[in-house]
Amino acid sequence: AQSVTQPDIHITVSEGASLELRCNYSYGATPYLFWYVQSPGQGLQLLLKYFSGDTLVQGIKGFEAEFKRSQSSFNLRKPSVHWSDAAEYFCAVGARNTDKLIFGTGTRLQVFP
Amino acid sequence: EAEVAQSPRYKITEKSQAVAFWCDPISGHATLYWYRQILGQGPELLVQFQDESVVDDSQLPKDRFSAERLKGVDSTLKIQPAELGDSAMYLCASSTAGRGMRNSPLHFGNGTRLTVT
């Protein structure tokens, strides 16, 4: 069965510092992979997605993620964090023949000035 | 940019009462989803519609939850009777995907925050 693990529940970084949020998935084949961001009291906004091809994908707001098949990972990165990036980040996996998404439990990002 | 509309934003209800949430997807989106997000967790799919038909309701607690999308456009999720454990954010999402989401990722509404007292 598909599953997603986000090992970091809470991460705190200083504004301007680099960021990496970890995501590991379990799936029998190459899945569709997504990162969503959720601000407090809001819905989820898609940051980026990976379906196939180049394993480094660029998203909105300066985020990127790298798919590593050997490690079953899809980590999210940003070279310089802004205070407005403080939010909850969710990694999700989708099977290639369905529309169903399985979400991880999320990582809460706190940014200090 | 078009949005998924949900109402109400917040709902407080007493246990054993009935409660309903409404969702209007992005125009033209045939697939509609209801997710439940318990505080501190990721969203969990409750039900998926393709047009007016239910595609997946395997995680919907059918003894108390019901969902409908009568005309294949907007949708209502109902809980009767509500229990304390139903307190959560209920998110609606839509996409143009039929089978597979390669060309149409999910677009989420802002959700309804339900508190059961």
Image (spheres, rainbow, N blue to C red):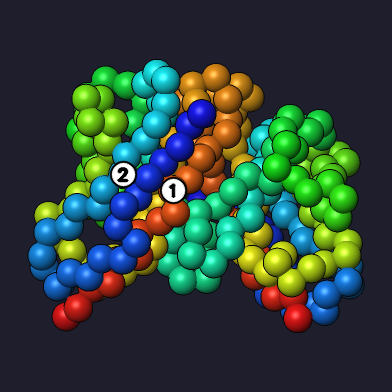
Residue under the image location 73 percent in, 36 percent down: B58
- Specify the amino acid type for callout 1: Gly
> In the image shown, does B113 or B96 lie closer to the viewer?
B113
Residue A59, horizontal then vertical, whole percent: 29, 44
Residue under the image location 52 percent in, 71 percent down: A41
Q: Is residue B4 left or right of residue B84?
A: left
Marker disc for residue A71: none
Q: Earlier in the sequence, mark 2 or mark 1?
A: 2
Marker disc for residue A23: 2
| Chain letter for mark 1 | A
Q: Is residue A5 left or right of residue A85?
A: right
Q: How far apart are marks 2 and 1 (CA)?
A: 8 Å
> In the image shown, does B98 or B35 lie closer to the viewer?
B35
| Chain letter for mark 2 | A
Proximity of marks 2 and 1: CB atoms separated by less than 8 Å: yes
Residue under the image location 28 percent in, 72 percent down: A110
Mark 2 surroundings within 10 Å by alpha-carbon count, few (fewer than 14), some (14 through 19), many (20 or more): many
The residue pinned by badge 1 equals A104
- Specify the amino acid type for callout 2: Cys
**B14 versus A31 height, above or below:** below
